[in-house]
Image: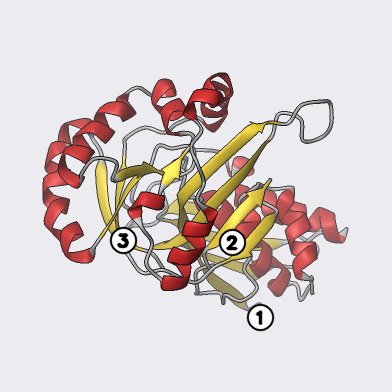
Amino acid sequence: MSTTHRARAFAKVNLALAVGPPVTGQGPKAGWHRIASWMHAIDLSDNIEAERVADDVKSSAPEHFDLRWADDAPLNAGEPLGWPVEQDLVFKAVGALEQAVGKALPTKIRLRKRIPGGGGLGGGSADAAAALRLTARAHAISLTEQELAEIAANIGSDVAYFLDPDSGADSPPRPAIVEGFGDRITRLERCEAELLLILPPFGCATGAVYRDYDEHMRRDRRGFDRKGIEEASAAGAPEADLCMNDLTHAAIRVEPRLAGIIERAEAVAGADRVCMSGSGSTLFVLIGQDRARAIEPELARVLLADGATIIRTRLV
């Protein structure tokens, strides 16, 4: 009888995100952007299970992947995913692992998602990282952290962040400063803070945001305060003044409705207190626990007409 292996896949926010110019030339990284980002996991997670099936079963068969939104998901509760299984990073992760070890790894995967898709919270990358570890465990495959990182690099630039060797199956990855193409990871101390997540009813296409950023980069870039981030992390208390995102204005130009949501949210939370995660469209307010509880109803009220969903969570 096969053993079912389980894990939680935690979302993250980019508390700070600086983006460099696109790489020029004809190499494999041409057009890519180097980043510097302060990433921190939050208390919002997906549940994933993996079970080895008979070796004579075709590997990575879509019918072995039961991927749905959880019944308690903040968006799309209980519904099927809105994209084909073959496009999901969990499916791609199992295929990448098979390619790396050179053999079929027939595995049943069950995923229940709560992390909204396409919003800059890293749900797909977190799920892929969990799928890599669980599939390897189900087939008793031993991989070094370097080997896992190399496989992760072929799936997505954020996947390596979620492959924290010092975190267990039900523990979030430690925060980190992530640099380069997502391959240079400096782990930091965990911080404690409440966040209000603002989930607009639309996403921001990552490719379109980066293309717009390339056109306006000189005007949009801000400073990434690495020293300040390291000091705040050591103290366990992140400062809202350290939060920034070079892609915010590009995301607004790609999706103008975002500007109105930010303006109305700042009228409640305070000027410059509303930040964006990743390439959008998720926004967050880093704030004290009492203040978060106090303003959450008012924030929900002023954003009701925008169709935005408000979630109170915390750094973990």
Height in image: 115 above or below 270?
below
Judged left or right of residue 249, residue 60 is right
Q: In terms of depth relative to the viewer, which is nearer, 156 or 166?
A: 166
Q: Tag 3, which secondary structure?
A: strand
Residue shown at 66%/77% (left/top)?
2
* Residue with the mark numbered 2: 162
Type of amino acid under label 2: Phe
Q: Earlier along the polypeptide chain: callout 3 or callout 1?
A: 1
How far is disc 3 from disc 1 in space, using C-alphas?
38 Å
What is the x, y in percent for residue 296? 17, 52
Marking on residue 165: none
Q: Residues within 10 Å of mark 3 (few under 14, many from 20)?
A: some
Q: Earlier along the polypeptide chain: callout 1 or callout 2?
A: 1
Q: Earlier along the polypeptide chain: callout 3 or callout 2?
A: 2
Judged left or right of residue 115, residue 165 is right
Badges 3 and 2: C-beta atoms under 8 Å apart? no
Q: How is the image coloured?
A: secondary structure
* Residue with the mark numbered 1: 1
Q: In terms of depth relative to the viewer, which is nearer, 141 or 68?
A: 141
